[in-house]
Image (cartoon, helix red, strand yellow):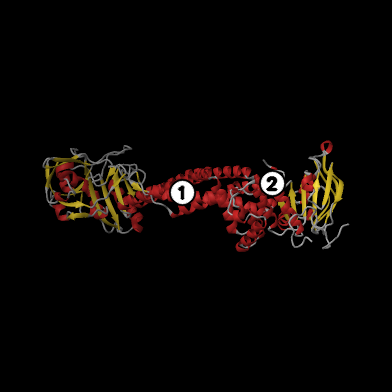
Amino acid sequence: MNVSESVKFAWRGVTANKARSALTMLGVLIGVASVIVLVAVGTGASQSVTDTLSSLGTNTLTVRPGSSSGGFFGGGAGAGSGGGDTTTTDTGTSTRAATLTMADAEALSDPTLAPDVVEVAPVVTASSVAATYESASHTVNSTTGSTAAYLSINNDTVASGRAFTDADYSAHSRVLLVGPTVAKDLVGGDGADILNKTIRLNGKAFTVIGILEAKGSTGQIDSDDRIIAPATAVQDHLSGYGNLSSISVQASSADTVNDAQTQVESILDARHHTTADDRDFNVSNSASFLSAASSITSIFTVLLGAIAGISLLVGGIGVMNIMLVTVTERTREIGIRKAIGAGKYDIIFQFLLEAVMLSVIGGLAGISLGYLICQIEIAGFKAIVAPYSVALAFSFALAVGLFFGIYPAMRAASLKPIDALRYE
Amino acid sequence: MNTNRLGRPVIDLRGVFKTYGEGEAVVHAVDGVDLTVERGDYVAVMGASGSGKSTLMNIIGCLDVPTKGSYRLDGVEVRLLNDQQQSKIRNRKIGFVFQNFNLIARTTALSNVELPMAYAGVSGRERRRRALAALDLVGLAPRVDHTSAELSGGQQQRVAIARAIVTEPVLLLADEPTGALDSHSTDEVLDLFDNLSAAGRTLVVITHEEEVASHAKRVIKMRDGMISSDRRLVAVAAPPPRLRQTTGRAS
């Protein structure tokens, strides 16, 4: 009995009852497809988070006021637009007021105390800034005032026009860079016409000198709905002269980020008369966020895959169920085959092959379906089909066929020919 | 009376018992049978239902093993064989013909006849050639591609006979081969058996019909698991008594 003969017999078995075979395959198909899709969604989500975090720079530190580690994306305790100036904080209350100043930012640029720090950018923010141009108006999600270094620290580039310079900063120039969303909203079209136009921010005239490169959106947050201007001009006209909302620091490389963090902390501790236990600021390290975020997303990927694995298991039990029915239904046929000389192993092989065929065909169809579903964009990011998930799902389907096929096949083979022939 | 043409007998049963159940409920289906069937013989085994003839047929066909006693098929002691070896001996030495044909459903006549050779490991082309020859012998050459559902009962039984003889077995074993056939098909099948017997094949036919038994060279009657009579109609070497069509061997 050769293999091609067994394949032929098994195929005949599969096609003998097409509707039933198709439904059995459907179980495996759904299992395999869901493993592939869910792992792809997990991988895609993980990739999306990683990309977003990487775009913020992997060798940057963000210093924020406040004693506890605040949200990474949150605005922190930024100075309000009409805020009065709290110059220094006093006394040892456990929660201190925000105390990052321009002087703090300048101190971090000390090449001897902070050798691993290459760039420092003080950041001021203004909230709910209304931008108007002619009759159009737009409330800007994020208004940032900083120095020219801010752009390089944050991996921001100017798509058209020019970036502002240190000279603009010193001169308190009312120039600004706009994100594509703001540009489109104000002038319509692709927003390119906004270049060199004067727009009003809360009524103050600013000249648009550049349009920022699009960053895309992360879920609900539109990263392109923003403007960046020299911090001096923002303080003059929008935020007032309160404390900084944060300081962005760039380390010389990704390897020196942790050293740079230590240096920044010791400089600020010295200036604020604090220690590690009672700091009124915190330093977040983008590299550590990145690794934390990717470990969280990979846990979710495994979780999703495991849930999908259960449906594959259920599909496998469906294969076993149908194979048991098939064996019972074809008891006579098994008897005939044994009477005319089929050995135990011929019978096992035939029925096992039939179970494997059901699960493998279902598995292949599941892979195709999984690929198709992954072409659809889900929740703003693209699912990425992980080759390992395809291999895993397929070999799992194969194993399911073998595992759940072996019992019915053994049962078929162990039937005594005489009992099998008499079976009605 | 027994002319031993090739030395060893095809079937050699010595003190064979087959019991089912235990203790009080024990049933002696075969209760001490000695039987020798020579090569070329054509034996009809008769008996009422419950006489043990079917159990005997299952033992002879290696579908069942005796509880006690010795069974040599073509010189091989069947009791000593394992499952796999029994499959092999059924495949090589026995051709079965059943009352209800037992063809594989949804499968063509040709594939059915090829099947025992597939299990024997005969190559595809050789298998096809021999299967077509066997189907030609039973007069079904024009219907090789029909499935069993597309064949009449008589035709199905002839496919089954072709399947039984295609491996050139030493024994052709038929269990009520005409039980499900009309009289015309019965005659066809019995003529076929006569011709196979005349060609030198060894046949054992289990039946309860005198008409079928009258074609055999030797008639054995069973009762209560034992042989009650053993009557020889013609010599082993002679042609079967009701052979109609003359063949080369029948003289």
Residue A96 to residue A358: above or below: above
**Residue contact between numbered discs 2 and 1, judged by CB atoms under 8 Å:** no
Residue nearest the observer in this picture, B78 or A146: B78
Quadrant for the C terminus of chain A in the image: top right
Chain designation of label 2: B
Question: What residue sits right under mark 2 in the picture?
Answer: B184
Residue nearest the observer in this picture, B73 or A257: B73
Would residue A243 be found to the left or right of residue A205 on screen?
Answer: right
Seen as rendered, the residue at the extreme right is: B1
Would residue A61 be found to the left or right of residue A386 on screen?
Answer: left
Chain designation of label 1: A
- Distance of mark 2 from mark 1, alpha carbons? 55 Å
Residue A253 picture location, percent across and down: 32, 59
Can residue B14 be seen here? The reply is: no
Would residue A307 be found to the left or right of residue B180 on screen?
Answer: left
Residue nearest the observer in this picture, B197 or B52: B197
Question: What residue sits right under mark 1 in the picture?
Answer: A366
Numbered tag placed on residue B67 in the rendering? none
> Mark 2 falls on what kind of element?
helix
Given the image, on which type of amino acid does mark 1 rest?
A: Gly
Circle 2 Cα neighbour tier, 10 Å, few/some/many (<14 / 14–19 / ≥20): few
Can residue A223 be seen here? The reply is: yes
Would residue A23 be found to the left or right of residue A72 on screen?
Answer: right
Quadrant for the N terminus of chain A in the image: bottom right
Given the image, on which type of amino acid does mark 2 rest?
A: His
> Mark 1 falls on what kind of element?
helix
Residue B129 to residue A71: above or below: below
Circle 1 Cα neighbour tier, 10 Å, few/some/many (<14 / 14–19 / ≥20): many
Asked if badges 2 and 1 are on one and the same chain, I answer: no
Residue A54 picture location, percent across and down: 33, 53
Residue A257 picture location, percent across and down: 34, 55
